[in-house]
Every structure is written in C-alpha cells, then in structure tokens.
Image (cartoon, grey):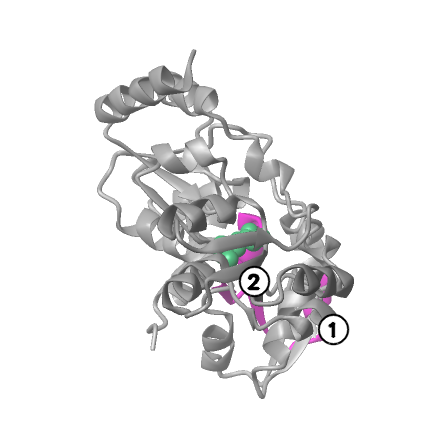
Amino acid sequence: MPSEALQDKIARLKQKRKAVILAHNYQLDEIQDCADYTGDSFELSQIAARSDAEVIVFCGVHFMAESAAMLAPEKTVLLPELAAGCPLADMVSPEALREFKQKHPDAAVAAYINSSAAVKAESDICVTSANVVRVINSLKQDRVIFIPDRNLAHFVSQRTEKEIIPWNGYCITHHRVYPDDIKRARRAHPQAAVIVHPECRPEVVELADEALGTGGMIRYARETEHDEIIIGTEMGMIYRLRKEHPAKKFYLLSAGLICPNMKYTTLEKVAWSLENMANKITVVPEIAEKAARTLQRMLDIPSN
Ligand code: 13P
C-alpha cells in the first residue's frame, strides 16, 4: 500500500481505537510524520503518564513501551514491532544487579530509562539523558550505582559531587563514534558546532561543543546562532531537525550512527497493530508495582 494510503488508514484506525501515536526522535521519517508526539525518552514517558487516550501506540523500542504500560496501567500499550529491543538495556539483568548491589549496600541505584522493567524494579530511581544530573544530585546517598550505560555514568560523574559506581554497558550505536570522526567532521565543516549524545565515549564528549540528549539537541538547534550543526546521535534526529529548521544545515557525525532496532517500526506495522490490537505490552503486577515507583520518583523531581 502506498505511504499516503497507509497514513490515511492509520488516521482512521487511530480515531476508531481512541489511540495516540508516540514516536521517539530516532524513528523513520514517515513514522515521525504520522505520530501525534515525537520526543525524547523523558518527554514520551511524561506524555504517556498524562495521556487520556485509550490506546498508546509506542513507536520506539521495548523498554519505552514497557515504561508507558507501567505509567498508564489503565491504557492499552502497543509496540508495533516486538523485535525492537535495546542492546544496552539487555546488558544488565535483575539477577546480576542484585548481586552487584550486595557489594555496595550503602549506594542508591539509578537506572537509565534504557533498562527492563525487572531491572527498574530493583532500582531506586530512573534517569534519562534529559535529567540525569538533576536526578543524581537529588539523591540523599553519596554513592550511586549507575546502570547500565558506562559512558553516561562517566558523563554524570564529571558533573556531580556524588561517587558514581558504573555498570559496564554501552549503546552499540553511540559507542561506534570515535574522536577521529569529530576531527574529520570539523575539517569538513569548520563553521559547524558539534553536539553529541552523552552515550558517546568520554573522549568523544570531550571534543564536542555540547553533550545533550535528543530533546536537548532540539532545543539547542532552536536557540543557537550556529547555522550549521554536526549531530552525534542516531540519524533519525536529522529528519526532525531539518524539518524544524529548513534554513540550517545538519550533518551526521558518522555514517555508523544508525540504530537498527529503531528502524524496525514501519507504517505497515503501525496500521497492523492498531487494526488487530496486536503486540500489547504488559508487565507482571509484582514487577510493575515496584518499577512504576522507580519511574514515578524521577517524574516527581521538579524540573528546576
Ligand atoms: P534520549 O532520551 O536522549 O531521547 O535517548 C534515548 C536513547 O535511547 C538514546 O540512545
């Protein structure tokens, strides 16, 4: 079916199901176009928690749909493609975390939102790239186990007095960026600013002008006087940035910045899951109760 016909079909099904479509900033262009809201992990979790729709179609990866299901337990959450996972989230299991916690009994556990519900249930509070420093500084403990991203752990350790105990995980997409990529991009576009995601290696963050989550990158592009910006995160961001700022130039920092999991969701799959109410994401109540508290503690922290 051609893309326009699919968009129409989705619009009809959306009305019929009283559904809202949420898309992460890394989604395919046409998915971003058909979404009601496009945003970063934090924004999308806030929208899911407040939405009055009956059905949430989550165009993103599994942990995002799981978080929406826990924050909006009375709603049906659909993940159009069940195979859309997050290798970073899979780098920590609840069993391994329980063992690690025994070695650091005085430390709080901060879980990046890129983690499973079962891991969140073992943690004290969630963080996203949009609020990580604020959330860590709000904790009463002086030592914090930070799971699962070691690069984000390093990023926050440079911006807090707390002792950060990192987990050894990483995002396979952001970890593929090297300092040489920044040097090459700056040579090619000497006037451009370089912004990277804090999931990049510390030596990459060091060479960038700013390290920001995807929501922060959107704000940066709105506020900066730079007309050219080199983007060090998943390539889906470029579509949204070019759409919002047609007069500015955006360059992808490295050709390797593509997350296959974020590209699994297609218009066909969105239409199919809405039509059949397929791929409902649920979390078992014992885990959901604890993990929702971990997420809610993050949402309760004032933004300033
Ligand atoms: P943001 O919260 O910055 O959108 O990041 C989500 C993510 O999965 C990065 O890899």
At label 2, counting other C-alpha atoms closer than 10 Å, the crowd grade (few under 14, some 14-19, many 20 or more) is many
At label 1, counting other C-alpha atoms closer than 10 Å, the crowd grade (few under 14, some 14-19, many 20 or more) is few
- Local SS, label 2: strand
Three-letter amino acid code at the position of disc 1: Lys
Place of residue 76 in the rendered image (x, y in percent of width and height, measured from the top left): 35, 33
Residue in the picture at 68% in, 54% down: 92
Return the mark for residue 103: 1
* Range covered by the magenta-colored residues: 98-127
As for residue 111 lying within the magenta part, the answer is yes
**Residue underneath mark 2:** 111
Three-letter amino acid code at the position of disc 2: Ala
Most extreme residue toward the bottom is: 161
Q: CA distance from mark 1 to mark 2?
A: 17 Å
Mark 2 Cβ inside 8 Å of ligand 1: no
**Front-most of 265 and 112?**
265
Residue in the picture at 72% in, 57% down: 177
Q: Is residue 54 above or below residue 88?
A: above
Most extreme residue toward the top is: 1
Q: Is residue 130 above or below residue 114?
A: below
Place of residue 228 in the rendered image (x, y in percent of width and height, measured from the top left): 51, 61
Left or right of residue 62: residue 36? left
